[in-house]
Amino acid sequence: MELYDVMRTTFSARDFTGDPIPDETLYTILENARFASSGGNRQGWHVIIVRDPQTRQALAQLAEPAAKRYAAQLQAGESPWNSIDPTSVDAATIAQTPAPARLTEPFIKAATVLVVCVDLKLVASIDQDLQRVGVISGGSIYPFVWNLLLSARHEGYGGTITTLPVAQEGNIQELLGIPSHVAVSAVMPLGKPVKQLTKLRRKPVSEFTTFDRWDGKPLMG
Ligand SMILES: Cc1cc2nc3c(=O)[nH]c(=O)nc-3n(C[C@H](O)[C@H](O)[C@H](O)COP(=O)(O)O)c2cc1C
């Protein structure tokens, strides 16, 4: 595929045909994704390829608590899980809110689930002393995670970067034998999408660019 076509059509696939992903294809996807950038080129990634149905079921269950809060906050008109505005939704409301199936079922229905981990002993977390949630550490793993999806798209497959299960990271580490200094960055259902989307909803450039200052003039097309 042409690069810009891949970039403009790599969507979050959550509905999959029953087709498996052959090991050779999985290898090709990983073989190309590994050229992603990471801080200091430390390449702290480790990918666990989960095929076992029971383990995938367990991952789906681990997504539920965070998915319930996500849905409850959306219903309350909030930006779910943001670290700036405290939620107004109480624990009882979250407990009563069902976890949307689209946030849990893909782990069970995908051909495979990739659990992408990153070794925090290798990541330079330059913002670790700032009084806000860490952002920089993710920069050493999400280019790789995104490359996985771009490569999958190129090979005719698709998936979704999911993070909801990571609210239960300790349980994922226990389930999969991951050491405690290794973070889970994404739990990615991967398979053959039922439908290939070609028109993704994204903001135009003029809405997120400014010259010289935050309040400068936008870059127009
Ligand atoms: C950091 C990150 C975390 C995400 N977490 C989840 C998740 O836990 N569950 C899920 O279904 N989608 C998750 N997504 C997928 C986004 O919802 C999706 O990329 C976005 O809605 C755009 O969808 P589209 O590419 O199909 O247009 C995540 C995406 C990113 C980049």
Image (spheres, rainbow, N blue to C red):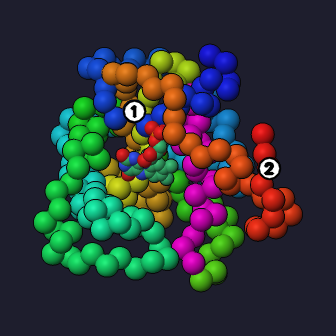
Q: Is residue 49 visible?
A: no
Please identify the quadrant where the C terminus is shown: top right
The mark that comes first in sequence, 1 or 2, is 1
Frontmost residue, 65 versus 184 = 65
Q: Which amino acid does label 1 sit on?
A: Ala
Q: Where is residue 122 in the image (x, y as percent from the top left)?
A: 62, 59
Snapshot quadrant of residue 126: bottom right
Q: Is residue 117 above or below residue 93?
A: above
Read off the magenta span.
132-152
Task: Give residue 219's mark.
Answer: 2
Query: Residue 104: x percent and y percent?
Result: 25, 46
Q: Which quarter of the figure has residue 67?
A: bottom left
The residue sitting at 34% across, 35% down in the picture is 14
Asked if residue 39 can be seen in this view, the reply is yes
**Front one among 100 and 176:** 100
Determine crowd level at label 2: few under 14, some 14-19, many 20+ residues with C-alpha closer than 10 A.
Answer: few
Q: Is residue 134 magenta?
A: yes
* Residue 214, image x, y percentages: 76, 67
Above or below, 103 against 170 in this view is above
Q: Residue furthest right?
A: 212
Element type at marker 1?
loop
Ligand 1 is within 8 Å of the C-beta of the residue at disc 1? yes
**Distance in Å between CA atoms under marks 1 and 2:** 31 Å
Please name the residue shown 18% across and 71% down the image: 93
Where is mark 1, residue-wise?
Answer: 13
Examine the residues drawn in magenta and state their main secondary structure: helix
Quadrant assignment, res 23: top left
Magenta highlight on residue 93:
no
